[in-house]
Amino acid sequence: MKLTIFNGSPRGKCSNTRSILEPFIDGFMSTEGNSYELAYLIHFELRDEQVALFKNASHVLLAFPLYTDAMPFVVKSFIESLEPLCGEKCNPDIGFIVQSGFPETRHSRYLERYLGKLASRLNCRYKGTVIKGGVEAISMLPLLDNLFLKWFCEFSAFTDFAGVGHLLDKKKLVNSFHELGKEFGVSGEFNKDLVTGLTEPDRISAFSFWAFRFVVHHLYWNLVLRKNNAFAERFARPYIGN
Amino acid sequence: MHITVLNGNPHTDNNAFDGYLGALSNQLESHGHTVTVFTLREMDIKHCIGCWGCWLKTPGECITKDDSSVICREYINSDLVLFASPVIMGFTSALLKKIHDKFVPLIHPYLELVDGEVHHLARYGKYPMMGLLLEKGRDVDQEDLEIITDIYRRDAINFKTTLSFARLTSMPIEEVADEIDHI
């Protein structure tokens, strides 16, 4: 099977989307005979080539982060360039991966409905949407240079502390997407059980939120704000008044 | 009310849409509102690259200098912001999404729990209501409109407000203006 993959992250090659696509691709390629092509939608100058890639593909995977509760501009602009292909009989099968920084996946459910409708608008067979929350946590880990904090994050990940600790477990994330890609490489479909596992949690408890917020505020945002000498200005309101 | 209209029409040849917004603005001004219209396709707006600079380097402002700062200032000092766009491929235009992504500096990176869901903290004390004005093309059905409205309703939670208005440009201008009067 040949899979055509579009990475729709505005961060391009430095994206969390890439971090989950890489193990997916590794898993997908473990089936003999499989091949793939990968395009970064951030390269607007290659739009015509990207549309041609889509047109000539038999299986497409479009992966991107959630931006302001929808697809980022980069992805919407690509979708608009596919408009001439609407209703064509030979458009590819299509599946989606939507990842976000929010720990719960329910934020992306509203966009999932759009993506299903998009597949039907393009006359593509819809393979489904994989939703993953809390992915920004993997960007945070390399920033920690304090041994105790590193240990704390590893302990939280190992024990899945407060039901959100697993979001700090990059190895688990990588393994999950590797397995998803491997299954996809064999069947050409997303494995439903694996998808269900990835979409947990849909909601989090107040205690889980407290734990998540502690980590995000103190081990990520505040750390970077201080490094950038911007901590004192973090509540700035530069646009008050005309 | 101070109303900001974001014209997300990417097509210079779609005079009907621009004409509708122009007539609506005049109508709203005749009702005593002040109206600012941004024709987004004529502005210099660089797309958001997700660098978090607006949260972690220059809090509250995008580190890329472009016209989005002018729109952000107008946005936060408005009572109502009208997101106006033709429906293209089942959603508001990429042009409108480009500025929408650039409103991230208006909220705070810190998180809070809202009705049991994680959302961002407000950066400002007051946020404008959101409104949606859509031009329905031939390939647009009721489900498309529901999907768009639901996504904007969700987005309003993150932008500390509500989606208080969602209408089509097939509605007479006078009626739209009257509805806005009564928000």
Image (cartoon, rainbow, N blue to C red):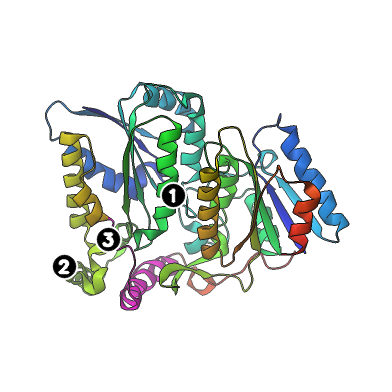
Q: In this view, does A216 lie above or below A40?
A: below
Q: Does the magenta stretch include residue B121?
A: no
Q: Look at the numbered discs 3 and 1 and tell me whether their residues touch, using CB distance below 8 Å.
A: no
Q: Name the residue under label 1.
A: A111
Q: Does the magenta stretch include residue A219?
A: yes
| A216 or B61, nearer to the observer | A216
Q: For the residues tagged 2 and 1, is the chain the same? A: yes
Q: For the residues tagged 3 and 1, is the chain the same? A: yes
Amino acid type shown at disc 3 = Glu
Chain letter for mark 1, please: A
Chain letter for mark 3, please: A
Instruction: Identify the magenta region.
Output: A199-227
**Pointer 3 or 2: first along the chain:** 2
* Mark 3 or 2, closer to the camera: 3
Q: What's the CA distance linking mark 2 and mark 1? A: 31 Å
Q: Residue at x 45, y 73 (%)?
A: B115
Residue at the front extreme of this rendering: B142
Is residue B88 shown left or right of residue A110? right
For mark 1, does the 10 Å Cα neighbourhood hold few (<14), some (14 to 19), or many (20 or more) residues? many
The answer to which quarter of the image holds residue B47 is top right
Label 3's element?
A: loop
Amino acid type shown at disc 1 = Leu
Q: Which residue is drawn at 74% across and 59% down?
A: B180
**Pointer 3 or 1: first along the chain:** 1
Q: What's the CA distance linking mark 3 and mark 1? A: 17 Å
**Pointer 2 or 1: first along the chain:** 1
* Mark 2 or 1, closer to the camera: 1
Quadrant into which the N terminus of chain B falls: bottom right
Q: Mark 3 points at which residue?
A: A200
For mark 3, does the 10 Å Cα neighbourhood hold few (<14), some (14 to 19), or many (20 or more) residues? some
- Percent position (x, y) of residue A21? 27, 43
Quadrant into which the C terminus of chain B falls: bottom right
